[in-house]
Structures are given as structure tokens and as C-alpha cells.
Amino acid sequence: MNPIWDHLLLDCRLATMAETGAAYGAIEHAALGWRDGVITFAGPQSGLPEKPQDLATHVDSAGNAWITPGLIDCHTHLVFAGNRAEEFELRLNGASYEEIARRGGGIVSTVTKTRMASEDELLAQSLPRAHTLARDGVTTLEIKSGYGLNLDAEAKMLRVARRIGTELGITVRTTFLGAHAVPPEFAGRQADYVDEVCVRMLPAIARAGLADAVDAFCEGIAFTPSEVRRVFEEARALGLRVKLHADQLSDLGGAALAAEFGALSADHLEYTNEAGVRAMAAAKTVAVMLPAAFYTLRETQLPLIASLREHGVAMAVASDVNPGTAPVLSLRHAMNMACTLFRMTPEEALRGATVNAARALALTDRGTLEPGKRADFVVWEVDHPAELAYWIGGDLARRVVAGGHSV
Ligand code: DI6
Ligand code: FE
């Protein structure tokens, strides 16, 4: 009989993250099989239908290692030029993030550098960051534009994001974030810039197929709820799903606004109120927790984790990799912060970086280890899945597999 699968890994401990009733959806003494990049078997080894050698071309032992779904980082601004270590220093000398932004620093300084960089330079600067995330277990990565703020530079960022996926053999989902900040040439003409985003940039980006979703920064230092509404209406007309930077620094009702548009996710949420939580629950909008930004800004207002939990809002955890508020290059580190700072459990943090992150990206083919899902998984050097959120740093991923191939 010819083997039916490409690969079969024996002696696994699977944290499937599927809703099995067991913590982490765990299955011990398990086997994992896959063919053509898709999982064909994820269950007790005793349940294999044939002898391993008859089932797969390549049969290996995982040596009783823990295996999880590939990690999914569902919110990053990973493509940018330069960095903002200088601003970090300014903040340590007393300036606030908002003051720096008002003085033309902050996001706009990254915009200047990103516009100046050629596409290849931008790739060369950004790729190592993505590589670092992937080595730590990330097999699906969302990347936003938002440091170009004109059509050419935004398109350049999104092309670089797509090239990162091709270069590393991981999945990259792109998000258009033209409404991130007002570029200097539109200073004092914010409404005109919103026009530019809605009438010119967004339709062209959509036509070029460069964006999988549309995001905006709804904040006192960025865009008002009514400006965001215009962007979302345009996105809806173009058939693109939306997500929102909501209530990060103040409560502008961002979570409820996102929910009203059936957003995939509302992200940050430190200042979101109970009504916002209820609106998200009703709309099944995922709450994306970004504790690295909370940490970097030394924020003290905690998102309403207990209420989100109580209302059954799915919580994701993402790195928010960006040069201003989250210079973090490990999704696991963000998971650690989600536990230590936000009091999420290690299991919630892992769910947040797998199954719930998949939901935040509208990806139904991944996030758990189950037959029919993509063969995206990580073999870890740990004795318990809680270690993934417990260790700060460290080199824990023994093997990272995306679409059936080692990354
Ligand atoms: N919220 C954030 O935390 C990042 N963007 C956003 O909308 C910060 C981006 C930056 O400072 O460069
Ligand atoms: Fe962000």
C-alpha cells in the first residue's frame, strides 16, 4: 500500500487549542500527520488507522515534545524605516507620547524615514524583525501600512509586507492604515487628508489588491469617530473588513464604533467602557490585547479583561511591533505581559495568539491542530504549555513549520 500522508510525527504532546474540554485542548501520547500542507491527523497515537510506516512517507518521533498551532501575530506595524530610540530617551527625560506627537515627532518621524527608503531598503530593514518573530514561533503575521501616508509610500509598505511573507514562507495579512496620522503636508487640513484617504488612497489600494483589511487610529491625537466612520464606510463599499485602534489613550467610544461596522477586531481597549464591551460581544468583534504598548507607555488604565471574559468576547494577544510604543520582537513576550500585566491566564494568552488571533484575521483554516487545518505548528522545548507565556525571552522553538514546510 502506498503511504497516504507526507509526514507523520509520533510521540507528541499536542496543545491543539481546539474546544475539547481539556486545558489547551491537550492530547498526550499523540501523533500529528499532514499532507500537502494540511493536517490529516491530530489525535491519540493509538487511534492511527494503520501502522505508521504504511501511513506516511516520512515518519519521525517528536520525543514527547509539546506542539502548538503556529503562533499568529494579528496586529503589527513591522514594516518601517529607522527607529525611535531617541524618542525613547526623550520620554525617559520627561516628555509624554502625546507631547512628542504634537511636536511633529512620533509617528511622523517614522513617516519621513519610511518615505525616503527604497522598497528594497525597507524590506532589508523589516525582514530581520519578521524573521525574529518567526523563529519564536510566528507562522502568520498581520502587517499594517500607516508610515507612508501617501498612496505611493503606503503601497510600497504593503508590497514590502507581502514580500516578507514570500521570503520567509509564512502567511502575511496586510492591513491598510492610511488613517494612522496626518502627514506634515496636510497639517491643519485633517479633513482634506481624510478625503485623500477615502477618495484616492483606499480605492487604489483596494484595486491593486494590496490590503486584506482596513484599520484606523481613533484617538484625540489621531482621527475622530466621525472621520473613522467615513473611512469605514468607504472600506465597506469596497468590500473590505475593518479593525480599529480603539480607546488606547482615551475613551472615544471606539470599541462600539468598531462593533457597529462588524469589525474583525477592536485593538488596545485600555479605556473601553462596559457599553463598548457589550457592543463587541454582540458583534462578535475580537478584542486584541496589546500589552507591550501598555508597558512601554507605562499606562496604568487596564482594559476590562474580567468584563470581556464574562461577556464571552474572544481575546487575542498581539505584539503591536512598532518603533514608537512597542519595540518588541517576540509574540511570546507579549503573551507574558498579557499574563503579568493584564492578568490573563497562560492558556488565554496562548488562545489569544492562536485560535482567537485567527478569528481577528478572518482566517478559518488555522489556529488549532485539527484535521483539515493548515499544517502550521511549532515544536517547543518545554515541559508544559504554560511555559510559553512564563519565560521572558529564551529560545524555545525547536522547529517551526508553516504550510507543512520548516521555516
Ligand atoms: N497605536 C500605537 O500604539 C501605534 N500606532 C497606533 O495607532 C504607535 C505607532 C508609533 O508610535 O509609531
Ligand atoms: Fe498598533
Image (cartoon, rainbow, N blue to C red):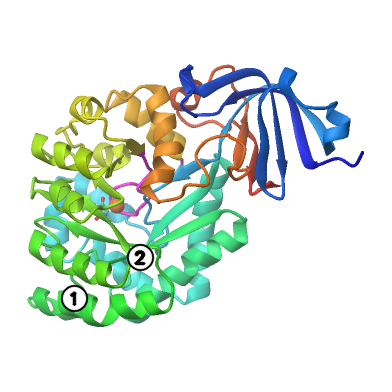
Residue at far right of view = 1
Up/down of 380 relative to 217, above or below: above
Q: Nearer the viewer, residue 238 or 247?
A: 238
Q: Amino acid at mark 2?
A: Ser
Is label 1 in a helix, a strand or a loop?
helix
Q: Position of residue 200 (x, y in %)?
A: 26, 82
Q: Residue at x 60, y 25 (%)?
A: 14
For label 2, the crowd category at 10 Å Cα-Cα, with few meaning under 14, some 14 to 19 and many 20 or more, is many
Q: Position of residue 384 (x, y in %)?
A: 54, 17
Please tell me in which quadrant of the rendered image residue 150 appears.
bottom left
Q: Which residue is mark 2?
A: 145
Q: Amino acid at mark 1?
A: Pro
Left or right: residue 202 versus residue 304 is right
Is 328 inside the magenta-drawn segment?
A: yes
Q: Which residue is mark 1?
A: 184
Q: Which residues are magenta?
A: 317-330
Q: Nearer the viewer, residue 205 or 1?
A: 1
Is label 2 in a helix, a strand or a loop?
loop
